[in-house]
Image (cartoon, rainbow, N blue to C red):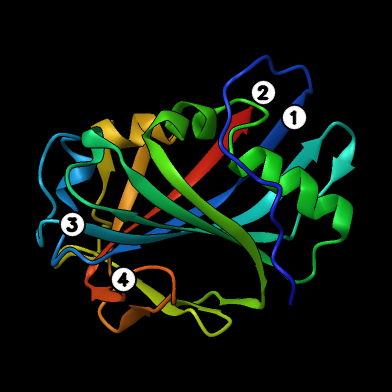
Amino acid sequence: MKPSCCARFVKGTFEMTWELAGQMLEVCNCGLLCPCWMDLTAPPDRGWCGTAILFDIERVNVGGLDVAGRKVVMAAEIPGAFANGNFTVHLYVDEGASAEQLRALEQLFTGQLGGPMAALGPAVTTLLPTRVARIMVQHGEIVTAMVSEAGRLQWAPRYDPGGRATKVKAAEAMAAFGIIEGHPAKTAGSQWSDPDMRSWSGDSGMMSRFTWRG
């Protein structure tokens, strides 16, 4: 699988009309619930954050191109508090994407078309070449995902003793990703190992729905 080398986080004028919607599944190396969700200046549990965010795309139109059904994983290494930036980011795009779809997804997830990823751009110091990967997702009571050789991720939604879903609303980091509400999840057993980043495991996860437009 050949990586793409043309993606980069940018700021500029965004002229293309687009819409992207689906499920956003986040897991990181914190022990319970990543403090970044509540306070972007809070230090991560282990002093640094390793995270992987799966975007399971259900509806998308990028300048007339339909890329629904594709999956993207954004892995990041953050050396301290989210607000301090200096992120290293690695994008994984599923191998089912055509060359045209790959270009469109790179544009979306590196901020070239605006939206939340453009706002994130100034925090990204290093963007590794996009990797085309086999991304397999299985939905059920527990959601599981395999990302080629890089990671095995899983989310078990949290509930109270009465069976009501645990929810977080209007948290600080949610605004950064353009989402309003999240469902915290147990992610024990998740592992990420990228040769260009630090390996990690953890038990912090958030499951959300998103709709972005530009």
In the rendered image, which residue does mark 3 sit on? 48
Around disc 3, counting alpha carbons within 10 Å, would you say few (fewer than 14), some (14 to 19), or many (20 or more)? some
Q: Are marks 4 and 2 in contact (CB under 8 Å)?
A: no
The N terminus sits in image quarter: bottom right
Q: Nearer the viewer, mark 2 or mark 3?
A: 3
Around disc 4, counting alpha carbons within 10 Å, would you say few (fewer than 14), some (14 to 19), or many (20 or more)? few
Q: Earlier in the sequence, mark 2 or mark 3?
A: 3
Dot 1: element: strand
Q: Are marks 2 and 1 in contact (CB under 8 Å)?
A: yes
Q: Earlier in the sequence, mark 4 or mark 2?
A: 4
Q: Which mark, residue 18? A: 1
Q: Nearer the viewer, mark 1 or mark 4?
A: 4
Residue 149, percent from left and from top = 53, 85
In the rendered image, which residue does mark 4 sit on? 198
Q: What's the residue type where badge 3 is placed?
A: Trp
Q: Quadrant of residue 39?
A: top left
In the rendered image, which residue does mark 2 sit on? 214
Q: CA distance from mark 3 to mark 4?
A: 10 Å
Q: CA distance from mark 2 to mark 1?
A: 5 Å
Q: What's the residue type where badge 2 is placed?
A: Gly
Q: Earlier in the sequence, mark 2 or mark 1?
A: 1
Dot 4: element: loop
Q: Earlier in the sequence, mark 1 or mark 3?
A: 1
